[in-house]
Every structure is written in structure tokens, then in C-alpha cells.
Image (cartoon, grey):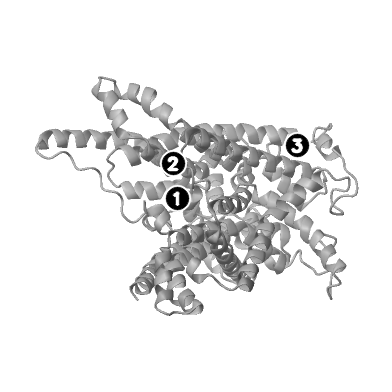
Amino acid sequence: MIELRSTLAGRITLAVLSTLILLFLALPIIVIVVTSFGKDAFGSFPPEAWTLGWYRQLFADGSKWPAALSLSALVAAMTTVFSLVLGMTAATALVRSELPLRSAVYGLVLAPLVIPQVVIALGLFLLFEPAMMLGSPIAIALGHTVLASPIAVMILMATLKGIDERLEDAAASMGASRLTVWRRITLPLAMPGLVAAGIFSFITSFDEFFVSQFLSSVDTVTLPVQVFNVLQYNVDPSVTAVSAILIAVAVVALALVGVVRKLSGSGKQDGLLPTEPGLGLPAGSETAS
Amino acid sequence: MTMAATALAPTPAPAAPTPAPGKRGLGRALSERRTRFGLLNATPVVVYLLILFVYPIFSTLMLSLKGEEGGFTLHWYTDAFQGANLEILLTTLRISAETSLLALVVGFVLASAISRLKPLWAGLAMLVVVVPHFISALVRTYGWIILLGDNGVVNNALTDMHVPGAPVQLLYNEIGVVIGTTAVMLPYTVLLLYAVMRGIDRRLLAAAASMGAGRITIFRRVYVPLVAPGLVNAGVLSFILCLGYYLTPALMGGEKQTMVASLIDEQVMKQNQWNGASALGIILLLLTFAGLLLLRLLKSAAEALRNRGTAS
């Protein structure tokens, strides 16, 4: 804001304030990662002595963590597949074709993002309980897909909008069938978007709490539910190590998205947070274009 | 559902390309093909969401209107607005208001600071905003529990600095909850505000300055009206998201900070009270709809304010 070039004191105040706010966002994450390597998992910070013990303890005999971790990974993988299929078809319908009631369909697709998750979870319980599907990984994945698919649709819509439709038309005019065009032209061009959408669906499912909580049974518990139970009732210091792993998964996933975007040369400035424009509450200029 | 759909839908759906003039028959045939293709592709997601999203919410609604021995009743709703339940409802509204207000103020400061930075630094700062957003809120809440405990980092620092009254009780009370939920909502407000601020035409501010307006006048009469739509968006959005939020209040709050989502969870998991939980869920849903409706109304108001700002 050149014209508002304020006094030096004003600028310093703003700089200090915003540094503190950034610290406010980063601190809880830093503290967990550091604590997970500390001898005293609940105590002093920074730790007085270092250890890998909490990580080792995760895989000790009788530990519930490996089962929870593999269930979460399985559910997240299924969610990714479901959301990509739904996301790609929905994005094609919304971007590449004429759809009656288009904005109603778009609204329906995005609605799960603003509806309180506890309400969605409650409803899903009512659906799956009579079907005797509680605790089934498929049921949990189907539930997670409700929350992950809007994000996939948004990313894939942006991807399809970015692909020059004339390339598809050109292939079709050379006699390629619709399926061939899709397989040979659209799909390869959409690959970066598909990877990003897949990764975001995976993280959404991997972190999801409420739906898992309502749809799990005694012996099928996802990682976040297990973490929550430990934090609420027991004292299990290895939970810091699990939390650090969850942080690592998210950071690696985001880095992957960044790499894919860089390689494909798309999305150079924005869109790291797909939920933002897609919440359907567009904030002026950014989403207007 | 229809209400959510209309409230959510982006205002103008981009018009489909009109068929080439002259060849009307061919154009219409092509258009029909595109429509069929669209319906075919939209079917999976629509069917999916009707079965796993719309129908479950509908059965929640039905359950909330059903008496213990069947039959229609509003008993569960009157129950929700009485005694301890009413208190929890009010607490939810209060904590959501406190959180969204705080997230808005803090987000405004950070977003405006970032929008003045050079691209490289702005990108790095946005990374610090965005990355936490994708890290499980549960994990971040746990981080706050470590930070804010009686022997946590914050209290140790306060004690070392000989702040009177330290250690301060920062957990299991409202201060803790609001700190935790604000940290969760902050990325949303920063991103929404930053998007608006980056889109502001700086020449408007320069013009105001060249006409002799002081810094405060420019801020108040030009900058804030320009940012107003973003403020409305971010404020209402974080309020709505907070209403149904659960993890942080459940882990960082005391008895007085119970929110509706916790109450629903408790009714289901501990008391097996599905009808009451459903009624609370529907109330939460209606509050969300009310928020979205309010957003629509405020949006047009903010639009008017902005037009006045740019016009003058």
C-alpha cells in the first residue's frame, strides 16, 4: 500500500504483529514434532533429553496403533478412488456439457462442505446401522467420500477449465471416439489435477474424525478416533509420535501436490487451498475470473 | 436442501456457448447431445449424494419428529430449548461469535500485512497459513494442550518474565477453547480476506490520497468498504463452521464450554438418545442455513457499500 506508506512505527508494529500471528499458527505443530522426540512426552519444553522411544512404542506388542493406522490408510485409499470417479464425472458434467439445473447440481455437490459434519455423521449412522454396516471400512469410506468429493470436484473443474477444449475437438474431428478422446487426450492432460484431487481426498479421509467416530465399531477404529480417545481418557505418551506422523503425512502430501503443480506448470500462484473458492462464497476478484 | 443449494450456488452460471448461427438444426442436435452427455456424467454424483447425503439428513429430520412410541411430536425440539440444553445452545452461539470475531480481526491484520509483502515473502507467509490448515485439527489441538498447560511453554515463559498472576489457567476454560478454535478458523479468514485485498485496485487509494484524504480517512472510507465483502464472507463463514465444531471444545474446554456437537455426540454415544440428538442436529442445520441466508443478505448490502466507496 504505497499510498498508505505509514509511519515507521506503524510498519514495525504491523510486522511484529503479523510475525506473532504466523507463530500462533505454526507453534502447535512445531511443539508436537519436537515433543515427540523428547524423553518426557508431557513435560518440559524444549525437552531435556531426546529419544525415539515413543515411535518404537507404537509398534510394541498389544499396541492398537498399527491396526488403526492400516484401517485409516485403507479407508483413505478407497475414499480416494470413490472421489476421483465421482469428481471426474461430475466435473465433466459441470464444465464440458450442458446440464439442466446446473447450479442446483453444483450447489448439491458443494453442500457437504458447509453442513455441520456432526449432522452428516448422524445421518450416515442412521443409514448404515440398519444395514449392519457399522465398523465396515467400506461404510466409513463411503461416508468420507461425501466430505472428500466436493474438494475433488472443485479441483477437477478447475483442471478441465484449464484444458483447451479444441484439443478434444481436434481429436474427435480426426475420427476418435468419445472414449478414445477421453482416454488419450483428456485424461493425460488432466493428470496433474487428478493427482492433486486424489491427494486432497486422501488427506481429508485420513484426518476425518466425526464420520469415523459414528461409523466405527469397537474393534475398527481409525487413527484420529484413536488419538481422540487417548487424549480424552487415557494417558499414552506415544500419542505425540502418532501426531507427528499425521503431521508428516500431511506435509509430504502437500509437498507432492506442489511438485506435481510445478512439473505441470499450472496453478503457479493460487489454489493450494481448494476449499477456499469452492465454499461457494466467492470473495470478489479471485474467483470472478 | 434446496436452500443450501441456492445459497451455495455461485451467482451467475457461465452461459453455455451458443450453437453456431445459421445451422440451427445441427446446433440443436449438438446441444441435445451435450445435454445427454451432461446428464450421463452428473448422474453418479447426484445419485451418490441423494443416497448418502440428502436421504440421511432427511431421516434425521424424520427421527427428530418421532415420539418414543411413534407418532408425530415436537417434544425433542422443546426439550432442546430448555434448561441445560438451551444453555449449551447459547454457549455454542457465544463461542462461535467470539471465535469468528477474533479470527476476523487477527485475519484482517495478517492478510493486510501479507498483501503488502513482495511476492516471494507473501508466498512464504501464505505457506505458513495454508499448511497448518491441512494438518489434522485434532493434532493441532493437542499441540495447544501441550502449549497452554500449567507447566506448558506459554506459562513457563510468563513465569520466567515474572508476569503477575502466572501461571494463568489457560486450559479447560473459555480462553483455551477460543484460542484453539480461532487457530482452526484463522486460515479460512486469512485466505478469504487476502483474496479480496489482493484484488483491490491500489490506484483508488492513491486517488484518495491525491485528493488530500488522510491515512485514517482512506482506510475508513476507501479501504474498509473495498474489503467489506470479504469481511462479511469470512465472518459468517467462520461462524457457521464454528457452530458444528467439536474437537477443540471437547478437548480444551471445561463443563461450561460444552457445544452442541459435543451434546449430540454424548446423547448418541452415552445415552442412546437418537431422537434428541437428531433434533439438535436439525437445529444446527437450521442455524447454518440462517447463516447462509444472512450471508446472502449482507453480501448485497456490502456490495452497495463497496459501490458507494468506489463511487466517492
Dot 1 surroundings within 10 Å: few (below 14), some, or many (20 or more)? many
Along the viewing direction, whichever of A245 and B54 lies nearer the viewer: A245
CA distance separating discs 2 and 1: 9 Å
When the figure is inspected, residue A195 is found, relative to residue A144, above or below; the finding is above
The residue depicted at 9 percent of the width and 38 percent of the height is: B22
Q: Position of residue A225 (x, y in %)?
A: 68, 45
Q: Name the residue under label 2.
A: A153
In the image, which is nearer the foreground, mark 1 or mark 3? 1
The residue depicted at 12 percent of the width and 40 percent of the height is: B21
Q: Quadrant of residue B196?
A: bottom left
Is residue B113 in view from this perspective?
yes
Return the disc, 2 or 1, that comes first in the chain's sequence: 2
Left or right: A280 as drawn, with respect to B25: right
Do marks 2 and 1 share a chain?
Answer: yes
Q: Mark 1 points at which residue?
A: A278
Disc number placed over residue A65 in the picture, else none: 3
